[in-house]
Image (cartoon, grey):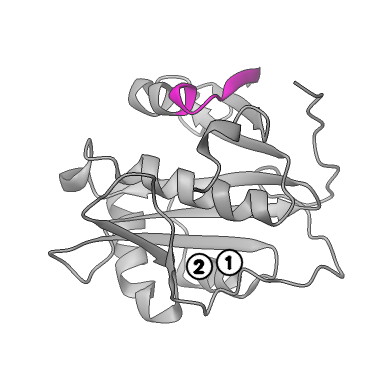
Amino acid sequence: MGPIRACPTSLPAGRICHSPGRTDTMSPSDSSPVEASATDSPLTVTHASEADLPQLLRLEKLCISHPWTERGFLDELNHSESLLLIARTAASAAPIGYLAARRCVDEAEILRVVVDPAQRNRGAARQLLISGFRLLITEGVRAFFMEVREDNAPALGLYRSLSFRVLHRRPNYYRDGCTALVLAADSEDLGWMAAP
C-alpha cells in the first residue's frame, strides 16, 4: 500500500482544500441513480439537490449535536469539489441518509455519513460510502480520510470493515472532550469494491 499524505490546507480543520481548475463531472444537480452496491438493495443512492434540503436539515438536526445550517448544505451542493449523496428506500421519497465528501486533487475527506436512527443497521451507511468511494475513485481519488469519535463503536466497526485504519488520534477534539480518530484508506485498500 502506498503512503497516505495529508492534504495541505489553509481552511479550518475538518475541511479539505479546493483544487481550482478541476472540471467537475460529479454535478450536484445530477439526480441520476448512482451504483449503490454489487447486490440488489431496496435503497437508491443519488446525488442530492436543493429540493432535498428540508430533509437533509431534518436528518442533520436529528443525528448531529452541532448541525450544519441550510447555508452549509448549500455551500456543499454548490462547491465544485463536493459530493453530496442521499439514500432513499423504495417505500419513501424522503432521504433516510446522506454522505458528504470533499475532494482535493487525488484525496478526499468524508465529512458526514448520517442515517436516520429508525433506519440504521440496514446497510444504508455502507451503501452510501461504497457509492461515494466508487464515484470518487473514478474521478481520480486515491486516498480517503475521515474523523470519527473514538467512542462511536458502530461507526468504527463499519469503517474498519471497509478497510479504513487509524492514522492518528486527536485528543479532546470534540466539544464534549471526546477524542477523534483520523481514519485513512487508499484506493488499493478499496480495490475490492470496484464497480462491476
Q: Is residue 171 found left or right of 61 in the rendered image?
A: right
**Is any part of residue 131 visible from this angle?**
yes
Q: Is residue 162 magenta?
A: yes
Asked if residue 142 is positioned above or below residue 99 in the image, the reply reads above
Residue 123 coordinates in the image, percent (x, y): 28, 40
Residue 170 coordinates in the image, percent (x, y): 64, 22
**Which residue is at a point 70% across and 57% down the rendered structure image?**
139
Asked if residue 8 is positioned above or below residue 68 in the image, the reply reads above
Residue 69 coordinates in the image, percent (x, y): 46, 65
Could you tell me which quadrant the N terminus lies in? top right
Residue placed under numbered mark 2 in the picture: 73
Q: Nearer the viewer, residue 53 or 39?
A: 39
Mark 2–mark 1 contact, CB under 8 Å? yes
Residue 154 coordinates in the image, percent (x, y): 33, 25
Disc 2 to disc 1, C-alpha distance: 5 Å
Region of the chain picked out in magenta, as a range: 159-167
Q: Of helix, strand and loop, which one carries label 2?
A: helix
Identify residue type, mark 2: Phe
**Is any part of residue 172 visible from this angle?**
no
Asked if residue 29 is positioned above or below residue 22 in the image, the reply reads below
